[in-house]
Image (spheres, rainbow, N blue to C red):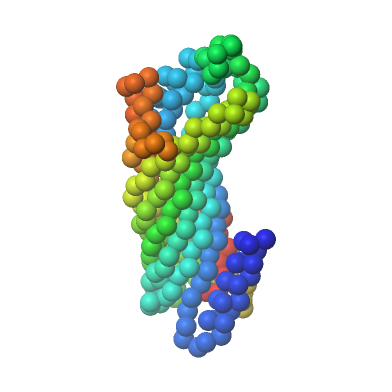
Amino acid sequence: MKIKIVLVFLLLFVGELQAQKGVRFFFEVSGGVNSFAMERFNQYYVDSFAKINNIHDVKTTKGFNRSVVFHYFISSTFSIGTTFTYLYSKEKFENATIDFPYNESSNIINSDIIIQNDAKIFGLSVAYYLPFFRKKTNFYTKHFSSSINATFGYAYTKSLLNYSTVNRQLDFKARNIFASFALGIDYKITKKLFFSSIGIKIGYNQLESKVLKDKDNTDWIVLGYYPINLDFSGFYGSLVFKLGK
Protein backbone atom coordinates (compact mmCIF):
# COMPACT_ATOMS: atom_id res chain seq x y z
CA MET A 1 0.00 0.00 0.00
CA LYS A 2 2.81 2.41 0.92
CA ILE A 3 4.57 1.71 -2.40
CA LYS A 4 1.37 2.51 -4.35
CA ILE A 5 0.96 5.81 -2.48
CA VAL A 6 4.58 6.79 -3.25
CA LEU A 7 4.16 5.95 -6.94
CA VAL A 8 0.96 8.00 -7.19
CA PHE A 9 2.70 10.93 -5.50
CA LEU A 10 5.62 10.71 -7.93
CA LEU A 11 3.26 10.60 -10.91
CA LEU A 12 1.49 13.75 -9.75
CA PHE A 13 4.79 15.44 -8.93
CA VAL A 14 6.27 14.70 -12.35
CA GLY A 15 3.06 15.89 -14.01
CA GLU A 16 3.20 19.21 -12.14
CA LEU A 17 6.84 19.72 -13.10
CA GLN A 18 6.14 18.92 -16.73
CA ALA A 19 3.34 21.49 -16.74
CA GLN A 20 5.93 24.16 -16.03
CA LYS A 21 7.40 25.32 -19.32
CA GLY A 22 11.10 24.63 -19.65
CA VAL A 23 11.31 22.17 -16.76
CA ARG A 24 12.29 18.69 -17.97
CA PHE A 25 12.21 15.90 -15.45
CA PHE A 26 11.40 12.24 -15.87
CA PHE A 27 10.68 9.33 -13.58
CA GLU A 28 11.65 5.80 -14.64
CA VAL A 29 10.89 2.34 -13.28
CA SER A 30 12.39 -0.87 -14.65
CA GLY A 31 12.74 -4.56 -13.95
CA GLY A 32 14.45 -7.51 -15.56
CA VAL A 33 16.89 -10.39 -15.28
CA ASN A 34 20.60 -10.62 -14.42
CA SER A 35 23.47 -13.03 -14.70
CA PHE A 36 25.61 -13.19 -11.55
CA ALA A 37 29.24 -14.30 -11.24
CA MET A 38 29.17 -15.43 -7.57
CA GLU A 39 32.46 -17.33 -7.94
CA ARG A 40 33.45 -17.48 -4.27
CA PHE A 41 29.91 -18.17 -3.08
CA ASN A 42 29.47 -21.03 -5.56
CA GLN A 43 32.95 -22.49 -5.14
CA TYR A 44 33.40 -22.21 -1.39
CA TYR A 45 29.87 -22.38 0.02
CA VAL A 46 28.08 -24.59 -2.55
CA ASP A 47 30.88 -26.88 -3.77
CA SER A 48 33.03 -27.05 -0.63
CA PHE A 49 30.27 -27.12 1.96
CA ALA A 50 26.63 -27.49 0.91
CA LYS A 51 27.25 -30.09 -1.79
CA ILE A 52 29.58 -32.39 0.17
CA ASN A 53 27.19 -32.27 3.15
CA ASN A 54 24.23 -33.17 0.91
CA ILE A 55 22.39 -29.93 1.65
CA HIS A 56 22.06 -28.81 -1.98
CA ASP A 57 24.19 -28.43 -5.10
CA VAL A 58 22.45 -25.52 -6.87
CA LYS A 59 24.78 -22.68 -7.80
CA THR A 60 23.68 -19.04 -7.95
CA THR A 61 24.22 -17.82 -11.52
CA LYS A 62 21.21 -15.61 -12.23
CA GLY A 63 18.65 -13.38 -10.59
CA PHE A 64 16.50 -10.31 -11.01
CA ASN A 65 16.75 -6.53 -10.91
CA ARG A 66 14.44 -3.67 -10.01
CA SER A 67 15.29 0.00 -10.40
CA VAL A 68 13.81 3.45 -9.81
CA VAL A 69 15.38 6.54 -11.43
CA PHE A 70 14.60 10.25 -11.16
CA HIS A 71 16.37 12.42 -13.76
CA TYR A 72 16.69 16.04 -14.85
CA PHE A 73 17.73 17.16 -18.35
CA ILE A 74 20.67 19.55 -18.20
CA SER A 75 20.76 19.78 -22.02
CA SER A 76 19.12 18.20 -25.05
CA THR A 77 21.56 15.27 -24.90
CA PHE A 78 22.36 14.83 -21.18
CA SER A 79 20.33 14.02 -18.08
CA ILE A 80 21.51 13.35 -14.53
CA GLY A 81 19.78 12.07 -11.44
CA THR A 82 19.50 9.67 -8.56
CA THR A 83 18.77 5.96 -8.66
CA PHE A 84 17.87 3.05 -6.42
CA THR A 85 18.58 -0.48 -7.68
CA TYR A 86 17.73 -3.81 -6.10
CA LEU A 87 19.46 -7.02 -7.24
CA TYR A 88 18.48 -10.39 -5.83
CA SER A 89 18.39 -14.15 -6.22
CA LYS A 90 16.40 -16.67 -4.21
CA GLU A 91 16.53 -20.46 -4.02
CA LYS A 92 14.19 -22.65 -1.97
CA PHE A 93 14.76 -26.33 -1.20
CA GLU A 94 11.84 -28.18 0.38
CA ASN A 95 12.45 -31.02 2.84
CA ALA A 96 16.20 -31.03 2.18
CA THR A 97 18.29 -33.61 4.06
CA ILE A 98 21.06 -32.16 6.19
CA ASP A 99 23.49 -34.73 7.49
CA PHE A 100 25.62 -32.66 9.84
CA PRO A 101 24.65 -31.91 13.46
CA TYR A 102 22.32 -29.04 14.20
CA ASN A 103 21.18 -30.49 17.52
CA GLU A 104 22.33 -33.06 20.02
CA SER A 105 19.91 -35.85 19.20
CA SER A 106 20.55 -36.52 15.52
CA ASN A 107 22.99 -35.86 12.71
CA ILE A 108 20.31 -36.13 10.01
CA ILE A 109 17.62 -33.46 9.78
CA ASN A 110 15.05 -32.66 7.12
CA SER A 111 14.42 -28.94 6.71
CA ASP A 112 13.17 -26.42 4.20
CA ILE A 113 16.03 -24.13 3.19
CA ILE A 114 15.80 -20.64 1.70
CA ILE A 115 18.94 -18.99 0.37
CA GLN A 116 18.60 -15.36 -0.65
CA ASN A 117 21.35 -13.03 -1.83
CA ASP A 118 20.54 -9.39 -2.49
CA ALA A 119 22.05 -5.96 -2.99
CA LYS A 120 20.49 -2.56 -2.34
CA ILE A 121 22.23 0.20 -4.28
CA PHE A 122 21.91 3.96 -3.92
CA GLY A 123 23.67 6.06 -6.52
CA LEU A 124 23.97 8.76 -9.14
CA SER A 125 23.36 8.17 -12.83
CA VAL A 126 23.88 9.99 -16.09
CA ALA A 127 22.35 9.37 -19.51
CA TYR A 128 23.71 10.55 -22.86
CA TYR A 129 21.14 10.65 -25.65
CA LEU A 130 22.80 9.87 -28.94
CA PRO A 131 22.51 13.09 -31.01
CA PHE A 132 22.44 11.22 -34.32
CA PHE A 133 19.08 9.77 -33.35
CA ARG A 134 17.55 13.10 -32.28
CA LYS A 135 17.33 14.84 -35.68
CA LYS A 136 13.72 13.63 -36.17
CA THR A 137 14.21 13.14 -39.91
CA ASN A 138 12.84 9.61 -40.24
CA PHE A 139 10.43 7.15 -38.65
CA TYR A 140 12.96 5.87 -36.12
CA THR A 141 13.90 9.25 -34.72
CA LYS A 142 10.28 10.42 -34.57
CA HIS A 143 9.24 7.46 -32.43
CA PHE A 144 12.40 6.20 -30.72
CA SER A 145 15.34 7.51 -28.72
CA SER A 146 18.65 5.85 -27.85
CA SER A 147 20.87 6.51 -24.87
CA ILE A 148 24.04 5.40 -23.13
CA ASN A 149 23.59 5.11 -19.36
CA ALA A 150 26.10 5.01 -16.50
CA THR A 151 25.41 4.57 -12.78
CA PHE A 152 27.77 4.78 -9.82
CA GLY A 153 26.74 4.12 -6.25
CA TYR A 154 27.18 2.41 -2.91
CA ALA A 155 25.84 -1.09 -2.34
CA TYR A 156 24.63 -2.90 0.77
CA THR A 157 24.77 -6.66 0.16
CA LYS A 158 23.33 -9.49 2.23
CA SER A 159 23.23 -13.28 2.21
CA LEU A 160 20.44 -14.95 4.17
CA LEU A 161 20.37 -18.72 4.84
CA ASN A 162 17.19 -19.82 6.58
CA TYR A 163 16.85 -23.42 7.86
CA SER A 164 13.18 -23.26 8.88
CA THR A 165 12.67 -26.63 10.56
CA VAL A 166 15.50 -26.19 13.04
CA ASN A 167 14.80 -22.48 13.42
CA ARG A 168 18.32 -21.54 12.36
CA GLN A 169 19.00 -18.39 10.34
CA LEU A 170 22.39 -17.19 9.13
CA ASP A 171 22.60 -13.54 8.11
CA PHE A 172 25.76 -12.07 6.54
CA LYS A 173 26.33 -8.53 5.25
CA ALA A 174 28.93 -6.45 3.40
CA ARG A 175 29.30 -3.22 1.42
CA ASN A 176 31.15 -1.95 -1.63
CA ILE A 177 31.12 0.37 -4.64
CA PHE A 178 28.75 -0.29 -7.58
CA ALA A 179 29.06 0.64 -11.28
CA SER A 180 26.76 -0.06 -14.20
CA PHE A 181 26.75 0.73 -17.91
CA ALA A 182 23.88 0.19 -20.34
CA LEU A 183 22.47 0.95 -23.77
CA GLY A 184 18.82 2.00 -23.73
CA ILE A 185 16.21 2.23 -26.49
CA ASP A 186 12.82 3.86 -25.86
CA TYR A 187 9.64 3.89 -27.93
CA LYS A 188 7.67 7.11 -27.54
CA ILE A 189 4.05 6.29 -26.73
CA THR A 190 2.71 9.78 -26.15
CA LYS A 191 3.82 13.31 -25.34
CA LYS A 192 1.28 13.49 -22.53
CA LEU A 193 1.72 12.45 -18.90
CA PHE A 194 1.94 8.88 -17.70
CA PHE A 195 3.70 6.19 -19.70
CA SER A 196 5.32 8.53 -22.23
CA SER A 197 7.72 5.83 -23.40
CA ILE A 198 8.49 2.17 -22.98
CA GLY A 199 11.84 0.60 -23.74
CA ILE A 200 14.62 -1.80 -22.90
CA LYS A 201 18.06 -1.55 -21.36
CA ILE A 202 20.89 -3.99 -21.93
CA GLY A 203 24.02 -3.54 -19.86
CA TYR A 204 26.61 -4.78 -17.42
CA ASN A 205 26.81 -4.42 -13.62
CA GLN A 206 30.07 -4.44 -11.67
CA LEU A 207 29.56 -5.25 -7.99
CA GLU A 208 31.73 -7.55 -5.90
CA SER A 209 31.22 -7.17 -2.17
CA LYS A 210 33.88 -7.33 0.50
CA VAL A 211 34.04 -10.41 2.72
CA LEU A 212 30.65 -11.03 4.34
CA LYS A 213 30.33 -10.60 8.10
CA ASP A 214 27.77 -11.90 10.58
CA LYS A 215 25.95 -9.89 13.26
CA ASP A 216 29.02 -10.17 15.53
CA ASN A 217 31.21 -8.65 12.78
CA THR A 218 32.97 -11.97 12.21
CA ASP A 219 34.05 -12.88 8.67
CA TRP A 220 32.14 -15.71 6.98
CA ILE A 221 34.92 -18.25 6.39
CA VAL A 222 33.96 -21.73 5.23
CA LEU A 223 35.94 -24.66 6.67
CA GLY A 224 38.32 -22.18 8.27
CA TYR A 225 40.03 -21.32 4.97
CA TYR A 226 37.62 -19.83 2.43
CA PRO A 227 36.27 -16.27 2.91
CA ILE A 228 32.90 -15.73 1.23
CA ASN A 229 31.73 -12.65 -0.64
CA LEU A 230 28.92 -11.93 -3.10
CA ASP A 231 29.68 -11.06 -6.72
CA PHE A 232 26.65 -9.61 -8.51
CA SER A 233 28.71 -8.71 -11.59
CA GLY A 234 27.17 -9.73 -14.89
CA PHE A 235 25.03 -8.74 -17.85
CA TYR A 236 21.41 -7.72 -17.47
CA GLY A 237 18.33 -6.82 -19.48
CA SER A 238 15.42 -4.69 -18.25
CA LEU A 239 12.03 -3.50 -19.40
CA VAL A 240 11.72 0.23 -18.80
CA PHE A 241 8.69 2.50 -18.26
CA LYS A 242 9.45 6.21 -18.42
CA LEU A 243 7.12 8.99 -17.29
CA GLY A 244 7.30 12.70 -17.85
CA LYS A 245 9.87 12.93 -20.65
What count of labels does the image hold?
A: 0
x, y percent for residue 88: 51, 43
User: Which residue occupies 37% across, 56% down?
Assistant: 153
Q: Quadrant of residue 134?
A: bottom left
Q: Is residue 135 above or below residue 21?
A: above
x, y percent for residue 227: 34, 29
User: Which residue occupies 63% across, 18% down?
Assistant: 110
The residue lying toward the viewer, choosing from 127 and 175, is: 175
Q: Quadrant of residue 214?
A: top left
Quadrant, the N terminus: bottom right
Residue 49 in view here: yes
Q: Is residue 5 left or right of residue 45?
A: right
Give the residue at the far bottom of this rendering. Answer: 21
User: Which residue occupies 54% across, 45% down?
Assistant: 64
x, y percent for residue 105: 59, 11
Q: Is residue 91 left or right of residue 154?
A: right
User: Which residue occupies 46% across, 24% down?
Assistant: 46
